[in-house]
Image (cartoon, rainbow, N blue to C red):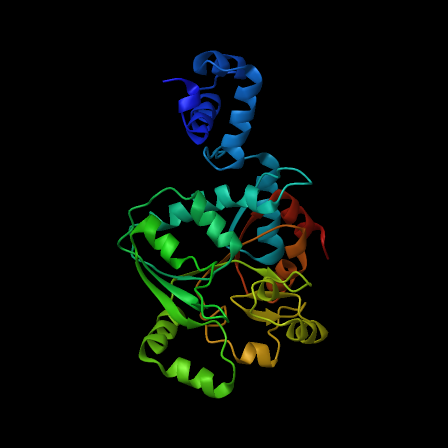
Amino acid sequence: MSDDDIPQSDLAARAGWLYYVGGMRQDQIAEELGISRQRAQRLVARAMSEGLVRVRIDHPIAACLELERDLRRKFGLNRVRVAPRLGPEQDATRAIAPSAAAEIERLFRQETPQLVALGTGRMLRAVCEQMQPVAAPQHRMVSLIGNVSPDGSASFYEVIMRFADKTGAQHFPMSVPVMARNTQELEVYRALPHVANLLTLARDADLTIVGIGQMADDAPLHVDGFLTAEELRSVQAAGAVGEICGHIFDSDGRFLDHPVNNLLVGLQVPANRAPVLCIGGGISKIKALRAALKGKLINGLLTDESTAAELVSSS
């Protein structure tokens, strides 16, 4: 079979394997696969960009360890991991997700059964995609937020099913809309037996894992259709800088007394004294992270080197 008969994704995966795992140079890969050096270079690049090969750094980098220490001291955090930066033009998610995935895998490998409450969002989805399977049937997971979008479709960034697929843990998704349209509808949703049970479970969680959203004009709540442009302007005028599981807070980390917050079906974080681990980073998230840390909404953080440095240096 010639290489023309082989799917390009297969060739890219093989080239990436030879380069990152086999330690071969690109000219050696070209010889091994019977292709040009330029094509080998393109295949290796494709393997990384499409996630066909995943690389993790197990060696702790001194600068990152120092930032972890400084974040603990400054904000009283009990769990911190700082991933090395990728560069000024790179999305922070690409740096954070592999590092955070390794940390989440370690949490699920613990033998003592835990009830884990989960948020939603782009970052948690990216982390789950980077995770290796972990046999963790001793644990349970419960959603903190509904999984139905305003148009009735399934929420694209709900992650509990993805985490369950990776871990085998018993899971409890919240099969209701993220937000009610009025107080009467909210009471109906919360009175549903399965929703009431999920809210009780979430309040008893041993660990909470969430992402964080910004409240600028590109706020995920607005981009994903949960907030209208008018509602976004209204919460911005009320001082909104960030949100966790849809609940919007100000620069002091205080949740807004606003109709939008008052109609959310899910649970506000923190719901108890158990650890709340936030995974997030990037320039757009600085204000939200700073506020969440100030208000003690989170006590654990998995982030990247650039975000950590900004948080440490800010007053």
* Residue 184 spot, x, y in % from top left: 47, 88
Most foreground residue, 27 or 305: 27
The N terminus is located in which quarter? top left
Label count reads: 0
* Residue 190 spot, x, y in % from top left: 40, 80
The C terminus is located in which quarter? bottom right
Most foreground residue, 110 or 278: 278
The answer to whether residue 82 of the structure is visible from this angle is no
In the rendered image, the vertical position of residue 206 relative to residue 96, given as above or below: below
Q: Residue furthest bottom?
A: 184
Corner quadrant of residue 174: bottom left
Q: Residue furthest left?
A: 137
In the image, 245: left or right of 3?
right
In the image, 246: left or right of 309?
left
Corner quadrant of residue 145: bottom left
In the rendered image, the vertical position of residue 68 relative to residue 250, given as above or below: above
Q: Residue visible at 36% across and 78% down?
A: 196
In the image, 213: left or right of 175?
right
* Residue 108 spot, x, y in % from top left: 35, 50
Q: Residue visible at 46% across and 82% down?
A: 186
In the image, 116: left or right of 248?
left
Corner quadrant of residue 238: bottom right
Q: Residue visible at 56% across and 60% down?
A: 212
The answer to whether residue 222 of the structure is visible from this angle is yes
* Residue 222 spot, x, y in % from top left: 61, 66
